[in-house]
Image: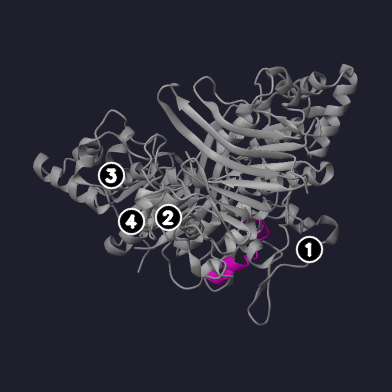
Amino acid sequence: MRPILEVRGLSIEAGSESRPIPIVQEVSFSVTAGSTLAIVGESGCGKSMTALSLMRILPEPGVRISAGEIRFDDEDLVTASEQRMQELRGNIISIIFQDPIASLNPIQTIGDQIIEVIRTHRSVSKREARSRAIELLRSVRLPDAERRINYYAHRLSGGMCQRVMIAMAMAGAPRVLIADEPTTALDTTVQAQVMALLRKAQTETGTAIILITHNLAAAAEAAENVAVMYAGRIIEHGPVRDIFLAPAHPYTKGLLGAIPDDADRDGDVAKLTEIPGNVPRPGTLPEGCAFEPRCKNSQARCRQERPDLFREGNRLVACFYPDSGTIAQ
Amino acid sequence: MTALLSCRDLVVEYPTADGVLRAVDRVSLDIERGKTFALVGESGCGKSTLARAIVGLARVASGSIQLEGEELTGLSQRELRKYRPAIQMIFQNPYGSLNPRLSVGRIVEEPMMVQRIGTPATRRQRVLDLLDRVGLTAAAAAQYPHQFSGGQRQRVAIARALALSPKLIICDEPVSALDVSVQAQVLNLLVELQRELGISYLFISHDLAVVRRIAHSTAVMYLGRIAARSSSRDFWKAPAHPYVRALKDATPSMEAIRNGAPRHQILEGEIPSALNPPPGCRFSSRCRYATDLCRDVEPPLREVAEQSWVACHLVSVTTEGGVVLPKAPDAAS
């Protein structure tokens, strides 16, 4: 199927023009209607900046797109006019953020905020917009929507605020929904509710979802495809099942081993696989492979040369010495 | 052998504008020497308040807390000082819990200064030993918190907690704010320290999966009460309590990928306000098994299997010793 959104060679940098600090480098991925792509990685890997760049809402001028294309249908969003972006934002391409309470305006009722979104993109009366807003709040199962539409955000719990955010993001039946850590700030049982809600919205509207998360298990459950990022680059990319069942990149493997997941575990308190060292900060990357200092497969070549993504079966992996035992399936 | 720390019918209340909020309601637990007791629950369940009560940061309304048989409740701050070295704490946010204006060496030394232990020279040596123990170099002593990553800061917090050779360390979500790859480092360090030094942990977390890897005994709290408690691994594989099961189901896992398991059972609704908890069983307002009995009578915590207690009227024990819930009503699923 033809992708709705296709990102090619996207690079993002910060700092001054003369001495730029690379934040994201040569990232490529695509999503098709009704499917979910998860972009996973740890803090500072560039996943959130990638998300913001798709909406062209990077904290400019400090952070900017320095190369690449974001193809949406036949347009390139990197070069699209600001006016065109305003038509798309919150309408055709929507985003929800990690902290739902901070994402809502504290001095406007949630109803007014949803009505504003609806009326920005469609010429409907206030009355119509209001009944549409109630309909949206019902569809995200906000209990007692008719009454709560008049509430301010502070009277709602985090889970309810995230429902409101989803209702707002879905107001224009967007073709692409970017969900940046949508459940990280929520309680476990509420997380499951919100993820179910996103799935429901996706089934109903055929929206493509780009899920940005640090939680590999959440990615495993929600997405068909996954891109693992490390230090600003995608280091492994492909179908979720293939990659999570048999990770090829040592970093992906390390991350999966570090999850306390005990499905087939018995016996005494056990050690988790740890990845030594820390996530490198932007601007302090080593010469060769960025993961080399923490990697157990590291060899001389890794210190001199940076591995590019290459195809291995139906996945892409950027490593000279991938875990061949697992890849030979 | 008696437990290191025992709480009996502990009640902690906060006055609020809307009345008295009972954050911890008649909770009893025992923490054994050299073992990890985990307290799991969602926000507002009372797990952090319970921890704060144990270290003397929250006022106990009734009930008892005993450290090696000595009663801690009702002691004045002065009297409590004698017991403070025995119970130390590590917090969730390693960015907020270290004074940014003090060097790491001073941060780790401070508990010894407060307790007037050793001379400046012996304390300095102890600081270096502690930093080494948690995997930091001696050079770290002269540096400041902002120069470290989250994981390293948590190591500093652990070194500080170890400074007074505590018997119990209360770890309040110690890895929740850390990156996945670093979480494992910190958890492994805690386990190692326990093996070497015989420390007990009260480990507070919202994540059952993390807890099951490191805890010897686990209790799940809901709205100020313990819903289930067990030190049996089998129990946690298929916890019989409806809330504990829902909590486990809601936690994303790799299981779905491994064996294409069906989607989770979604628990509807949110935790009710502790100002106005439902009568009867606290979970009855969200429980799909709930009967009239559940809505009227609060279920006591009862032993349903070896070392396993649940507070639920509906859990029954089969003749083979299995612990089961009744069949769920179809309408509610």
Foreground: A92 or B72?
A: A92
Look at label 3 and name its amino acid: Arg
Mark 2 or 3, closer to the camera: 2
**Pair 1/3: label in front:** 3
In space, the residues marked 4 and 3 are separated at their CA atoms by 39 Å
- Label 4 residue SS: helix
Q: Secondary structure at mark 1?
A: loop
Image mark 2: chain: B
**Disc 1 marks which amino acid?**
Ala
- In the displayed structure image, the side of residue B274 where residue A318 appears, left or right: left
Q: Which residue is mark 4?
A: A300
Q: Amino acid at mark 2?
A: Ala
- Amino acid type for the residue under numbered disc 4: Ala
Question: Start and end of the magenta stretch?
Answer: B232-248
| B49 on left or right of B280 | left
Q: Nearer the viewer, mark 2 or mark 4?
A: 4
Left or right of residue B104: residue A193: right
The residues tagged by marks 1 and 3 sit, at their Cα atoms, a distance apart of: 49 Å
The picture places residue A245, in percent across and down from the top left corner, at 58, 64
Marks 1/2: CA distance? 37 Å
Q: Which residue is mark 2?
A: B184
Circle 1 sits on which residue? B328
- Distance in Å between CA atoms under marks 2 and 4: 27 Å
Q: Earlier in the sequence, mark 2 or mark 3?
A: 3
| Residue A261 percent coordinates (x, y) | 54, 61
